[in-house]
Amino acid sequence: MSNDELRFNVEEELFWEPRVDNEAIAVATDDGDVILRGTVGSFREKREATAAAKRVYGVTHVDNELGVRILSDHKRDDADLRGAVLQALMLDAVVPSSIDASVEDGMVTLTGMAPFNYQRAEAEFVAGNVPGVIGLEDEVELTIDGPSPADVRHSIKKAFKRDASLDADALSIDTFDGTVTLSGHVESWVEHDAAVNAAWAAPGVRAVDDQIVVDY
């Protein structure tokens, strides 16, 4: 697929995504790499643009350089925004109360501890959807007491084999001190995300080093 064809397909997908203002986004492509530039009205819209681009066949990497500019009528001071983020986190039963948030110039930083990665990911998702947020840093640490590296590797390998969308034999798993390194080749972003999510779900995983190549 040529760069022009890929750019056209990404632009079409952005047009098709109702949560994104496609006219505010410029798309550049280079041998499977996609660069998104422009300014959007919310952090959530920025995230949705990345997700839309990844859905396009032929995309191997997305570099999201979109800026977020909140309209004057929707701007919030940092104290008000922090209160809204904390309220959203508190109302989500998945997010542990040990996660805190600070705000500076619209940029939210999540801190604290969580027993599991899915709780940390939920906090990041919820905070990023609060109106007025322009960016997010996730500094939440995991407090998992994990099994041995061999047990972690075995658990992930079994999860790969259970997933019909994954070719388990095409992926390699290495573990060290709670960090899982994934490598190999997959044929779509759906397969890529399934592998990464499966690794994060394994007991004892504190970090995932994603070296998987999306190879069409």
Image (cartoon, rainbow, N blue to C red):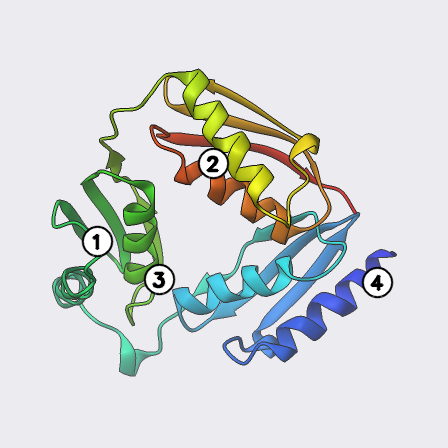
22 lies left or right of 45: right
In front here: 110 or 159?
Answer: 159
Left-right relation of 69 to 111: right
Residue 186 position in % (x across, y down): 70, 41
Eye-nearest disc, 4 or 1 = 1
Q: Name the residue under label 2.
A: 199
**Real-space Cα distance between discs 4 and 2?**
35 Å
* Left or right, residue 202 beside residue 107: right
Disc 3, SS: loop
Q: Distance between the residues labelled 2 and 1?
A: 20 Å
What residue sits right under mark 3 in the picture? 134
At which x and y percent is residue 87? Answer: 14, 65
Mark 2, mark 1: which one is toward the viewer? 2
Instruction: Report how far apart the C-alphas of labels 3 and 4 lie in the structure.
Output: 31 Å
Kind of residue at badge 2: Ala
Mark 4 residue crowding within 10 angstroms, few (<14) / some (14–19) / many (20+): few
Answer whether labels 4 and 2 touch (C-beta < 8 Å): no
The residues tagged by marks 2 and 3 sit, at their Cα atoms, a distance apart of 29 Å
Q: Residue 206: x percent and y percent?
A: 35, 30
- In the rendered image, is residue 155 in sight? yes
The numbered mark, 2 or 3, whose residue comes first in the sequence reads 3
Q: Position of residue 84 (x, y in %)?
A: 17, 67
First in residue order: circle 2 vs circle 1: 1
The residue carrying mark 4 is: 4
Q: Residue drawn 25% across and 58% down?
A: 105
Q: In the image, what residue type sits under mark 4?
A: Asp
**Crowdedness near tag 3: few (<14), some (14–19) or many (≥20) residues, C-alpha within 10 Å:** many
Marks 4 and 1, how far apart in space? 43 Å
